[in-house]
Image (cartoon, rainbow, N blue to C red):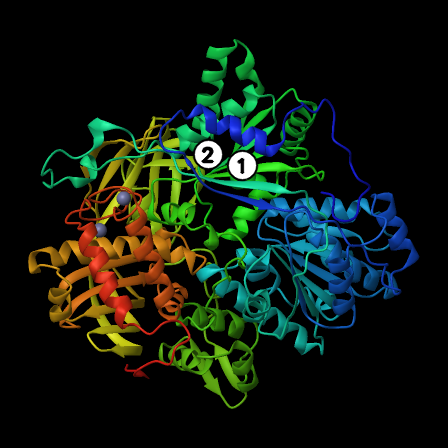
Amino acid sequence: MPPAATVAAGHGPDRPPGAAPAELLRRLRARTGGDADPVTHVERVPARPGEQAPWPQWTPEELRAAFARRGVVAPWRHQAEAADLAYAGTHVVVATGTASGKSLAYQLPALATLLADPRATVLYLAPTKALAADQLRAVAGLELDGVRPATYDGDTPRAEREWIRRHSRFVLTNPDMLHHGVLPGHAHWSGFLRRLAYVIVDECHTYRGVFGSHVAHVLRRLRRQCARFGRTPVFLLASATSGDPATAAGRLTGLPVAAVTDDASPRGGVTFALWEPPLLPGDHAPGAGGQAGGAGDLAPVRRSALRETADLLADAVASGVRALAFVRSRKGAEVVAATARRSLDEAVPGLGDRVAAYRAGYLREERRELERALLHGDLLGLASTNALELGVDLVGLDAVLICGWPGTRASLWQQAGRAGRSGDEALAVLVARDDPLDTYLVHHPEALFGRPVEATVLDPANPYVLAPQLACAAAEAPLTPADLDLFGDGAKEAVDSLVAAGALRQRPTGWYWRHRERPDVDVRGEGGAPVCVVEAATGRLLGTVDGGSAHFLVHAGAVHLHQGVSYVVDSLDLDDGCALVHPEEPDWSTHARDVTSLTVASVRSYVDAGPVGLFLGEVDVTSQVVSYQRRRISSGEVIDTRPLDLPARELRTVAVWFTLSPESLAAAGVEPADVPGALHAAEHAAIGLLPLMATCDRWDIGGLSTALHPDTEAPTVFVYDGHPGGAGFAERAYGTAAQWLRATRDAIAECGCEAGCPSCVQSPKCGNGNNPLSKPGALRVLDVVLANLPAPGAALPRQGDRRSE
Ligand SMILES: [Zn+2]
Ligand SMILES: [Zn+2]
């Protein structure tokens, strides 16, 4: 990682001529022939020179010399700014781009403090063990006396743990270990915690949704333990570029946090193209009047994003440029690499050898070998999963191909940032998949360029997170009234519920945990005990799947990927919490489908907009996974649908919903018989577009639409968080409803299909087989909603807050 102002690296060996991005894009475009131009937009992101700052005057000479040995002659301005704030005791988040040197921004004040105060300690948290291991190498490589950095995680041998607690002054761990190991064993850590100067939270944007809400309380528990020793450590957070990082970091830590967002590291220019694969001709289109059931199999389809990406990768390699393709799934990355290799070998035998696939789970040596091969040009094309976002250092790439919207603008920029790192001009191409959000984005460049990336969404007040976390805190030390402020909104109610449930006992001095065993709380899983995935032939435990997803992911017949190896599930035993699998790599993927019913439990807030109502509230969702589809990986073609026999499950969660009066629908020209299809199509597209507003993906949320719901007594579309107690996504949708539904309407209107396709109103996880669906009806429904709903920022006509038990 070049964390700071390294000396310019030059152009790397044997750089091919003619790799200028505009020329390369022209060549890629030319291949597609005369028909519709696949490129919907080209954005030129200009190069930016770096801006250095002097070392803060408090920087110890020893540290300056250590950084100089690493090639850092001076910090970039944003690094110095964040370091200065933190050194002065301000909690700070640095949220800047890939390779902008965030680690130097936190290493500098933390290590300077360790050198100045021989007793001080630092705790570093990373979301993954691999990242902590990389950071350990970086800090250890500085060879500073007396710092003794060490990782402390599930893999740390028992024999070393006590030494680390006593002697290491820079401990690297993860939130899981903090939750399960450090905090429950705080008595062993008292020496470390009473001297704790800084808590570094790296890649803090990954703490989102339910997991993020848990981590927020784990950090509050850490603050509470430090406070017992009179310690208030400074929090230093690093984030990918994100919208409003100060607020997100404030929610995560419960503290006021200053944000440094002005990236002063140099960047090469990028030509960014948005690419929409063409619709396949003829035989896939529905026949005349072909409205009959099974619409999913008749709709027109686009050329798959995987095929398109593979062809672009092959063309780039054939032109002699270095290209990296990002693909979401491991299997997908392998398909792209194999397809590109095949077509290159057909053109020039042997050329295919210059393309490889990269999977997560590669060893460090293997990663370094790939980096070397790519740097020297032995390898020209690489297809990878997002694993490369973290931890692999590739420089001198001419082009980055992004197969499908990676979920957030933050990830998009992180992936595009892999191109042209040494300051050269580079090409980035976003290849749209067949889904409404991708379709919207390639037709709305303004949603991608020149606007801030999305905010990280988490909700520490979620009672399903707060109550178990307060139980953990009470088991560590009795809770006092002062602690309720620390844990924030809803803490008192959660404590009362724990008392009522017999988990806590109230005494004059506080609330006490009543049991001998500690509470069993999994910060990553939710919705039931995790299900073990076991290889049937050997009895080997491969891993676990959280209880909430088990029905979807490890039902009998499901294809399950583990560390790049494919398994097929033989059976799922819910009583034992165990799925038996065998290794097998079929060329299809599996997609579970469920059926759902929903009742409204309470309304939190609403907007009364005449014929349209918009609501936020608690709902009870009952759902049952009933079948799964098998789909060909290379083409996405549906092979068949197979039934499943799994029990129904209940979920209390948060939903946003809108209602329309039947009269307003009739006036808009939606025939009564068309209402179910119109609402259903609007629901699918709205779910597909919500990730534009909140950092979720469509698998985090569910939906339901009905022409008459017994609780609302009106035609209604519900969209709910797929996590017990909610995760903040529906709340975000409610807060941005006009924008969200406007984008939904535009995505449907701009899709070139006639009667609806996976790029607009079809959903890959529909429990009803995408039937009925009415694309024109969905547009009319959304027009009625948007005509009545107040525009963003406008005064609301009538609204209220209502809470019921
Ligand atoms: Zn369409
Ligand atoms: Zn559906």
Which residue occupies the extreme bottom position in the image?
Answer: 508
Q: Residue at x 67, y 30 (%)?
A: 368
Q: Amino acid at mark 2?
A: Arg
Q: Categorize mark 1 by other alpha carbons within 10 Å: few (<14), some (14-19), many (20+).
A: some
Task: Determine whether, in the image, residue 330 is placed left or right of residue 685.
Answer: right
Q: Nearer the viewer, residue 81 or 601?
A: 81
Q: Quadrant of residue 691?
A: bottom left
Task: Determine whether, in the image, residue 164 is placed left or right of residue 185.
Answer: right
Check mark 1 vs ligand 2: CB closer than 8 Å? yes or no: no
Upstream in sequence: badge 2 or badge 1: 2
**Cβ–Cβ below 8 Å for labels 2 and 1?**
yes
Q: Categorize mark 2 by other alpha carbons within 10 Å: few (<14), some (14-19), many (20+).
A: many
Query: Which residue lies under the disc numbered 2?
Result: 330
Q: Which element type, helix, strand or loop, lies under badge 2?
A: helix
Quadrant, the N terminus: top right
As drawn, 593 above or below 584 = below
As drawn, 579 above or below 62 = above
Q: CA distance from mark 2 to mark 1?
A: 8 Å
Task: Give residue 195's position: percent from left, percent from top.
Answer: 76, 69
The disc at residue 360 is 1
Q: Nearer the viewer, residue 726 or 386?
A: 386
Ligand 1 shown in quarter: top left
Q: Nearer the viewer, residue 230 or 50?
A: 50
Q: Quadrant of residue 738?
A: bottom left
Q: Quadrant of residue 612?
A: bottom left
Task: Give residue 644's position: percent from left, percent from top.
Answer: 20, 42
Task: Give residue 503's position: percent from left, percent from top.
Answer: 41, 75
Q: Which element type, helix, strand or loop, lies under badge 1?
A: loop
As drawn, 306 above or below 699 = above
Q: Amino acid at mark 1?
A: Ala
